[in-house]
Image (spheres, rainbow, N blue to C red):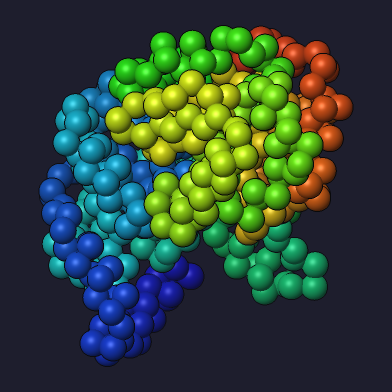
């Protein structure tokens, strides 16, 4: 009843307000145009999936593959327009049983409304974006599952109404997969354990391991041999990769570090977070400055790898996950800005992981901290990075064989369960 009352307000007062805002807001008109570019094929879908953006979609890819293999009619709903290119590639691929649709946020009526479709047997949703339409779908369908759920950063002490709302949200799902072991404890403490099935698993593990094994994007560049040739003179512990690097993190490269690079004592790979715009320009300018100081820079773009220096500046997207296994040490950007970027990818690829202190939004940081705290190094002062690296340079490599086997076994088991409950 709660969700239907919210829906009534959403489709009366809310829609009236949006009608007027449509003429005033360029952003709303742009969103509406995005939604209208995607047709909805009216079919009796057996499964609905929802992901808000790219990171959440990665959680669903293994499940999409499993459902496709079983020829289950599936509707994939997404929120963010940033996924448009990836969705286009998906809709034009060999996925014959998967239809794609942006969530109709502003004018959810007519032939593209979720309410025009038959309610599926199963609904799988990743993490957040608890829109009313999606919550009603979770309430009405027979099997509703929330994946990668987290309560990290949420404080309910003294906020009774807030806790009530989240109880209604999480209580709508039949099953919840917590994003990390710590989150599983948070949900149990929250009070959901008594009437819901709680488990802990992150489906990105299997997806990352598969990508790092196959290296499909890397092979498409036809640069594998060139990369391996350049890396060969350097032991694994002398190879450092800087993933999702921001301009403000260039302070990592203090004078001692720069001199070590100049003497070719280490191999450094720079993978900027932004591959165009001001952020890219700043890193490119820094590389030119290093060249003027006598450092050898190798550039990797769509034309290939140019040069054989011990510093690579890469402008090719989609490679970072597959590159991590080549390196012993990885610094992950974002932790000195808003929030650290993906830590699972370097966790499965490298031995030692370094990042800034902003891990408050990252459930992946919780997982890494839980599994191997001695291999996760928080760099609070950027200028101290090189000295921290030197202390860990000769430490023994991390053994992940047993954990990898366990994770892959759990991955297969959970996928089998989820794909057969549809």
Task: Identify the image quadrant of the N terminus.
Answer: bottom left
Instruction: Give the percent coordinates (x, y) of residue 327.
Output: 61, 21
Instruction: Classify residue 57 as left or right of residue 254.
Output: left
Instruction: Give the percent coordinates (x, y) of residue 243.
Output: 57, 38
> What residue is drawn where x is 49% and y is 36%?
313
80 to 202, vertically: above or below? below
39 to 203, vertically: above or below? below
Nearest the camera: 306 or 362? Answer: 306
Task: Identify the image quadrant of the C terminus.
Answer: top left
Quarter-of-image position of residue 115: bottom left
Instruction: Classify residue 367 as left or right of residue 170.
Output: right
> What residue is drawn where x is 46% and y is 51%?
280
> What residue is drawn where x is 41% and y is 57%?
277
Instruction: Give the percent coordinates (x, y) of residue 287.
Output: 54, 42
Nearest the camera: 241 or 144? Answer: 241
> What residue is drawn where x is 53% and y is 24%?
309
247 to 413, vertically: above or below? below
Whether residue 170 is visible here, answered yes or no, is yes
Instruction: Give the percent coordinates (x, y) of residue 259.
Output: 73, 33
Q: How many marks?
A: 0
Instruction: Classify residue 49 as left or right of residue 46.
Output: right
Whether residue 12 is visible here, answered yes or no, is no
401 to 49, vertically: above or below? above
Residue at the extreme right of the image, as rendered: 391
């Amino acid at each position: 009843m709660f969700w239907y009352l919210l829906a009534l307000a959403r489709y009366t007062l809310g829609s009236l307000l949006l009608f007027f805002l449509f003429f005033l807001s360029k952003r709303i008109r742009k969103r509406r145009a995005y939604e209208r570019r995607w047709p909805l094929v009216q079919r009796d879908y057996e499964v609905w999936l929802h992901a808000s953006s790219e990171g959440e979609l990665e959680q669903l890819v293994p499940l999409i593959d499993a459902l496709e293999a079983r020829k289950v009619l599936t509707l994939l709903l997404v929120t963010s327009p940033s996924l448009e290119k990836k969705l286009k590639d998906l809709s034009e691929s060999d996925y014959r049983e998967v239809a794609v649709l942006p969530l109709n946020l502003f004018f959810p009526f007519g032939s593209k409304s979720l309410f025009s479709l038959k309610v599926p047997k199963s609904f799988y949703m990743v993490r957040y974006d608890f829109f009313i339409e999606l919550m009603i779908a979770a309430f009405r369908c027979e099997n509703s599952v929330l994946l990668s759920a987290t309560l990290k950063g949420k404080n309910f002490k003294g906020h009774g109404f807030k806790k009530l709302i989240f109880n209604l949200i999480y209580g709508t799902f039949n099953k919840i997969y917590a994003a990390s072991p710590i989150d599983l404890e948070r949900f149990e403490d929250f009070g959901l354990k008594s009437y819901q099935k709680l488990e802990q698993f992150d489906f990105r593990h299997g997806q990352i391991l598969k990508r790092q094994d196959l290296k499909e994007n890397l092979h498409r560049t036809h640069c594998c041999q060139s990369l391996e040739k350049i890396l060969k003179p350097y032991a694994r512990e002398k190879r450092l990769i800087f993933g999702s690097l921001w301009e403000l993190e260039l302070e990592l490269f203090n004078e001692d570090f720069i001199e070590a690079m100049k003497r070719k004592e280490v191999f450094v790979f720079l993978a900027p977070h932004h591959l165009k715009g001001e952020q890219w320009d700043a890193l490119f300018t820094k590389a030119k400055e290093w060249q003027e100081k006598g450092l050898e820079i190798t550039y990797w773009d769509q034309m290939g790898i140019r040069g054989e220096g011990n510093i690579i500046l890469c402008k090719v997207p989609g490679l970072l996950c597959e590159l991590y296994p080549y390196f012993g040490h990885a610094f992950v950007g974002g932790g000195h800005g808003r929030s650290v970027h993906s830590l699972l990818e370097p966790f499965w690829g490298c031995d030692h992981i370094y990042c800034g202190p902003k891990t408050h939004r990252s459930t992946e940081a919780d997982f890494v901290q839980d599994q191997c705290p001695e291999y996760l190094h928080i760099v609070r002062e950027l200028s101290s990075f090189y000295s921290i690296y030197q202390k860990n340079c000769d430490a023994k490599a991390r053994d992940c064989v047993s954990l990898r086997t366990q994770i892959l076994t759990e991955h297969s088991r959970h996928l089998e369960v989820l794909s057969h409950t549809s």
